[in-house]
Amino acid sequence: MAIPMLQSLNPKQQEVFYFVRKWCMETAQGKRPDPFHIFLTGGAGTGKSHLIKCICYEATRLLQQTQENPDSVSVLLAAPTGTAAFNIGGSTIHHAFHLMCKTKDREGLSESTVNTMRAQYESLKIVIVDEVSMVDKPLMKSIHLRLRQLRQGRPNALFGNVSILAVGDMYQVPPVKGISLYKERDRDIFNLWNPNFEVVELEEIMRQKDDAAFAKLLNRMRVKRKKDKLSDEDDEILSSRVLSVDFEADDYPKDALHIFTTNIAVAEHNDKMLRLRCPDVRCFEASDFVKDPTTGSMNRRDLARGGKDDLPDVVKVGVGARVMLSRNVNVADGLVNGAFGTVSGVAGGQDDAREVATVFVQFDNPKVGALERQKSSSSQQSTCQFGSCTSD
């Protein structure tokens, strides 16, 4: 274990770290300790992500010593979203466990795929799930069933006898259209969470001094109810960020991230910023096809009419525009839903709004798209190229 990394842990973090380390050492020695199921939680700035990296580093180092297959995974890092997965150097849960997003049969796999996964995970001992607040009950059940399917151990073994370190904050973002793990239901036959996971809470703020005050404010806010009154200190800090200047004023922070309560307000602000930042705004229309039920042929509609979960009907873009990826392209490369960047160039699509164009984007995080840029022959070496995409 790298000494500086270990010395950076506070006593509570070290307690968790050494527990997992001892478990890994006993496993490597063939003692077969019972698998653990820990829910590591804590507010903003308490060092959850840093502890994940420390545990993953040490657990992988210890468990790899007994692996027969060097390509097999001993510690798996996963998260429910592409951004969260990239931040910890892992995969999305759906990708790691070959789960389908839009089907009730999340566990159905071909025999060939199952055999490939068994070889990949034959040495798997620990699964670390970050941002677990966004994992709903059906998804946790799918993880359990997939691990049990792959490990082929005792039929009732929890998570296939694989240890689970679930990390997150239940006060943060809940599952999208799903039921949080901690919520009890009368018909809950498959309750994997409450009776099985031991809670460990990190409380000490580990951020630098400049960020500590804001982190403490967030942690006070996270446990308040709507009717609870703010402290004078918190009210003063938040009130200091209320702007009295108009959007057109010179000192208005136009490049700051804006959050709105409706999609209409978002669209209005984006159009305003496009006109402000981009001298040449280009509009690209979607090509929307509908299947003829009689002939089976695909016919293009005159006007695109996509649903709210489909691709946008029109994309407006120009050099200098701030953009964000809305789909996962390559999680390992950081090209994930939520990655921010700036358009540095647009090629093609001059004469026809439906002509495929190439958009060049320079991402804020230089690590995002690094692998893609290595493969590119473009003269814009600091950018990533994006063309058209399709959606069913």
Image (tube, rainbow, N blue to C red):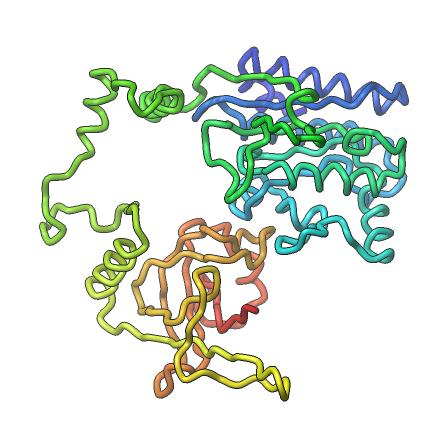
Query: Which residue is at a point 60% across and 86% down the rendered structure image?
Result: 297
Please identify the quadrant where the N terminus is shown. top right
Residue 90's x, y, as percent? 63, 43
Please identify the quadrant where the C terminus is shown. bottom right
User: Which quadrant of the view contains residue 224?
Assistant: top left
311 or 68, which is in the foreground?
Answer: 311
Is 311 drawn above or below residue 246 in the view shown? below
Is 379 drawn above or below residue 91 in the view shown? below
User: Which quadrant of the view contains residue 131?
Assistant: top right
Q: From this viewpoint, which residue is outermost toward the top? A: 11
Position of residue 144 in the picture relative to residue 116 (left or right): left
Query: Which residue is at a point 74% across and 22% down the rendered structure image?
Result: 36
Query: Which residue is at a point 70% across and 23% down the rendered structure image?
Result: 37
Residue 222's x, y, as percent? 39, 24
Position of residue 13 in the picture relative to residue 163 (left or right): left
Is 32 drawn above or below residue 262 in the view shown? above
Residue 245's x, y, as percent? 10, 43
Query: Which residue is at a point 46% across and 36% down the rendered structure image?
Result: 173
Is 97 drawn above or below residue 36 in the view shown? below
